[in-house]
Amino acid sequence: MSDDNIVKIFTASEVSVLILKGRLEEIGITSLKKDNFKSGVAAGFYGGPPDVVDLYIKEKDMDAAASIIKEFEDNQLK
């Protein structure tokens, strides 16, 4: 991702984040997955809960992504 502002749009298990990431890529939106636990372990220290992963997108893509994110979140609650 470039120097554009990025915003966190979703936090969940790695599986859920990867599914949403794939759906966003289908409509041409690049995203960034951040896993503090794996990053911390790789660096030699504790980095956060092992089952929590964050997904970020460029702020300028929020309007295009909003319906995909809402639909995904609604389906996660069922």
Image (cartoon, grey):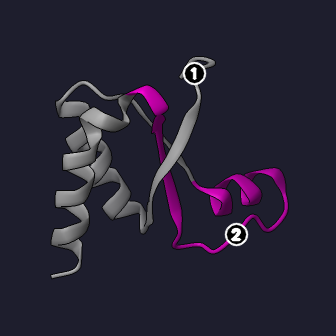
Q: Position of residue 52 (x, y in %)?
A: 53, 69
Q: Is residue 5 above or below residue 33?
A: above
User: Label 1 amino acid?
Assistant: Asp
Q: How many marks?
A: 2
Judged from the image, the secondary structure of the residue bearing numbered disc 1 is loop
**Which residue in the protein does label 1 denote?**
4
Gap between marks 1 and 2 measured at Cα: 26 Å
Q: Is residue 60 above or below residue 57?
A: above
Span colored in magenta: 35-60
The answer to which of 40 and 55 lies nearer the viewer is 55
Q: Quadrant of residue 16?
A: bottom left
Judged from the image, the secondary structure of the residue bearing numbered disc 2 is loop
- Tell me if mark 1 has few (under 14), some (14-19) or many (20+) residues whose alpha carbon lies within 10 angstroms of its own: few
Of all residues, the one furthest to the top in this rendering is: 2
Query: Who comes first in sequence, dot 1 or dot 2?
Result: 1
**Which residue in the protein does label 2 denote?**
48
Left/right of residue 34 with respect to residue 63 in the rendered view: right
In the rendered image, residue 5 lying in the magenta stretch gets the answer no
Left/right of residue 70 with respect to residue 48 in the rendered view: left
Q: Residue at x 28, y 51 (%)?
A: 20
Q: Position of residue 4 (x, y in %)?
A: 57, 21
Q: Position of residue 28 (x, y in %)?
A: 24, 24
The answer to which of 27 and 13 lies nearer the viewer is 27
Q: Residue at x 20, y 48 (%)?
A: 68
User: Label 2 amino acid?
Assistant: Gly
Q: Position of residue 13 (x, y in %)?
A: 42, 68
Query: Image quadrant for the C terminus?
Result: bottom left
Q: Residue at x 48, y 32 (%)?
A: 59
Left/right of residue 46 with respect to residue 3 in the rendered view: right
